[in-house]
Image: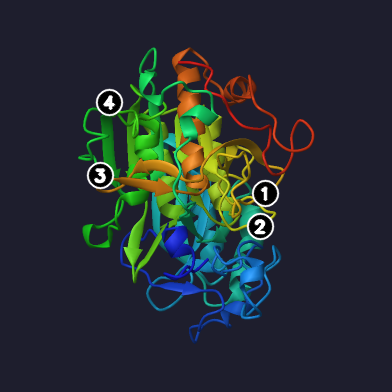
Amino acid sequence: MVRGKSGWLGSVLVLVLALGAGPALATLDGPSSPEQPAQSEYEGLPPGYDGLPDHVDHDECGGGCAEPRGADRPVGRVLRTEGARYEYVIVGPEAQAEAARRAVEAAGGAIIREATLSALDQTSQIATFPNQAAIARAQDLIAQQAADSSLSAHHLYYFAQSRRTPRVYAPALIGEDSVGRCHLSRPVTIGMIDGPVNPNHPALQGTSLRYETLVEGHMIPNADHGTAVAALMVGQDETGALAGFAQGAQLYAISVFGARDDVEEASVERIAVALDRMVGAGVRLINLSIAGPENQALGRVLRAAASRGAVLIAASGNDRRPQVAWPAASEDVIAVTAIDAARRRFRLANTGPQIEFAAPGVDVYAARTSGAGYVSGTSFAAPIVTALAARHMARGVGSAAAIRGRLRTGIETLGPGTRNTEFGWGLVKAGGC
């Protein structure tokens, strides 16, 4: 989805990754290159986000929305490379990489770069094609010759963030007497795939933090989002205001977000590399406060990480749609939505059957690049659930199924039935340290 300053960028920051030469960005309904049909006519892209500003409500359009929203519209934002061609990503087992390459080339496409995800036993390949027919042909050949590989548009993902009026309430809502009092009984490493983090922030200076970025220096955006997410999990603050919910945990943070033309986005390619590095480093709990469209190649990477014991927790997204964003919508990921102090769902939060848990995510007081402020979005609910999962891991709970079971212990049911599409099982509770 494309987000302008008055749209999602103001509320849901987003980023793109580009390994090698710097690719350009384009929307699917933007101008096409001479070699391709107009992107609004692309038929091979999966249904998903519509490209409209996500903080504009239906009743706020006033008839000015160019097109109606709908889950059946094509994805709004895909990475472009030099020559204005759209990129496609193929993820599959290393043993099938050569077969996938031959399939792409036989269809008239070209592999422009690739990376080995050794810890996941997968390979990520980036391809371009001259037209839609070539893409369809490549998909057919890959299905025949590299059946465990997936070819998808090289989608971009977004910070699941929005801004609202400030309030402080999160610790009490999940049953925490004081967030500053809880330290893990033993060290647990939390992985965080997000944007830049300011490791010199006072709330993070006393923590065990390993930080790296996959983005070139001139493309690095501000660190507000990443610093907030990091501090919500491991922050230390004697006043308790910026203390994390899993103090004492070690944090391994990888930034996959870059900035170009005032847009912040992250691609499947860099998300895959970050997951591979974390799994290779033995990280078994990973927070993803990012949101975007369904992507089969990303699904392969998530499945590979989960099969190696990684517990993945992600934000449901803030597009006010009855469709949970990816990666949260993947069956290998625990999807989290955001609620306010009155236990109402965040008005922009996506809904759907994949939602499992709700946590405070509206007017949450959090760290910024410098100082602190109030933030809203499912981005900030997810790390609270991840922090509570870290507490359970510190007590010896390891698998995703076991973590899910423990998080359901003491849950406060919200909405109809025992589980619903708005709140999942309900509001998570701290349950002590």
Identified by mark 3, the residue type is Asn
Q: Is residue 103 above or below residue 200?
A: below
Identified by mark 1, the residue type is Thr
Res 282 → quadrant:
top left
Alpha carbon distance from label 1 to label 2: 6 Å
**Mark on residue 198?**
3
Q: Are marks 2 and 3 in contact (CB under 8 Å)?
A: no
Q: Are marks 1 and 2 in contact (CB under 8 Å)?
A: yes
Task: Determine the residue positioned at 56% across, 22% down.
Answer: 399
Alpha carbon distance from label 3 to label 4: 19 Å
Give the residue pinned by disc 1: 351
Task: Determine the residue positioned at 45% across, 70% down.
Answer: 6
**Mark on residue 321?**
2
Task: Determine the residue positioned at 74% across, 34% down.
Answer: 419
Alpha carbon distance from label 1 to label 4: 36 Å
Foreground label between 4 and 2: 4
Where's residue 208, x and y in %? 26, 27
Q: Quadrant of the C terminus?
A: top left
Along the viewing direction, whichever of 14 and 61 lies nearer the viewer: 61
**Which element is circle 3 on?**
loop
Dot 4 alpha-carbon crowd within 10 angstroms: few under 14, some 14 to 19, many 20 or more: few
Give the residue pinned by disc 4: 238
**Which element is circle 1 on?**
loop
